[in-house]
Amino acid sequence: MGMRKKICLVTGGTGDIGKAICSRLVDESYTVILAGITAEQADAACQELECGNGTLASAVIDVTDEEICNTAVAGILETHGQLDCLVNCAGISYIAPVLLGKVKEWKKVLEVNTLGAFIISKAVIRPMIRARSGRIVHIGSISADVGAPFNAIYAASKAGIAGLVRSFALEVAAAGITVNAVQPGYVKTKLFRQTQGAR
């Protein structure tokens, strides 16, 4: 990539993990587009993190909406002329025993965590293919491998990300694009405290 400044989109950037990733990228001199589900949340996160040698901008992206994702990526390309990497941190959880869980809530977890990962990946892959370069990283979970009692649908959604990443990586490798997942264990974020940490 030479000396040109790298542009990175971070979805779910208003969460604790997302903000930490944005902060590190800014310190590494990236131009970071921090995306949240609302403008208020994204703007607040940007104000909190403004630091380092890079630059930070906010965006509103719902990863479950293909039109919104495509429009956001087009806006980034119009403003910056490139999009070098995506870090997808967007995710939700739902704690419930299998026997008592609500299908509506399970569908929402799958829509955000798994389908959302597919939709935002699809949005960024086209310009990356044209550039013959790109980096895509999805935040998965160790739950994909070891399971999570009372959180089966979350574990399933993260296992879906693992399969998605493996397949995407094989599909776009020849275009100079890498696709990976990071599968952390429990991190004491706000989401953790609201779900696992509350038990």
Image (cartoon, rainbow, N blue to C red):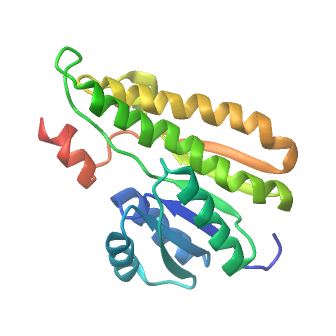
Whole-percent x and y of residue 96? 19, 27
- Left or right? Give the position of 156 relative to 177: left
Number of labelled discs? 0
Given residues 100 and 168, the one toward you in this image is 100
With respect to residue 197, does 47 lie above or below?
Answer: below
Q: Residue at x 56, y 50 (%)?
A: 66
User: Which of the 4 quarters of the picture holds residue 47?
Assistant: bottom left
User: Which of the 4 quarters of the picture holds residue 4?
Assistant: bottom right
Given residues 188 and 31, the one toward you in this image is 31
User: Which of the 4 quarters of the picture holds residue 49?
Assistant: bottom left
Whole-percent x and y of residue 120? 58, 51
- Left or right? Give the position of 96 relative to 26: left
Q: Residue at x 19, y 20 (%)?
A: 97
Q: Quadrant of the N terminus?
A: bottom right
Q: Is residue 141 visible?
A: no
Q: Is residue 113 visible?
A: yes
- Left or right? Give the position of 2 relative to 65: right
Q: Residue at x 64, y 72 (%)?
A: 76
Q: Residue at x 39, y 57 (%)?
A: 17
With respect to residue 139, does 190 lie above or below?
Answer: below
Whole-percent x and y of residue 100? 16, 19
Whole-percent x and y of residue 84? 71, 64
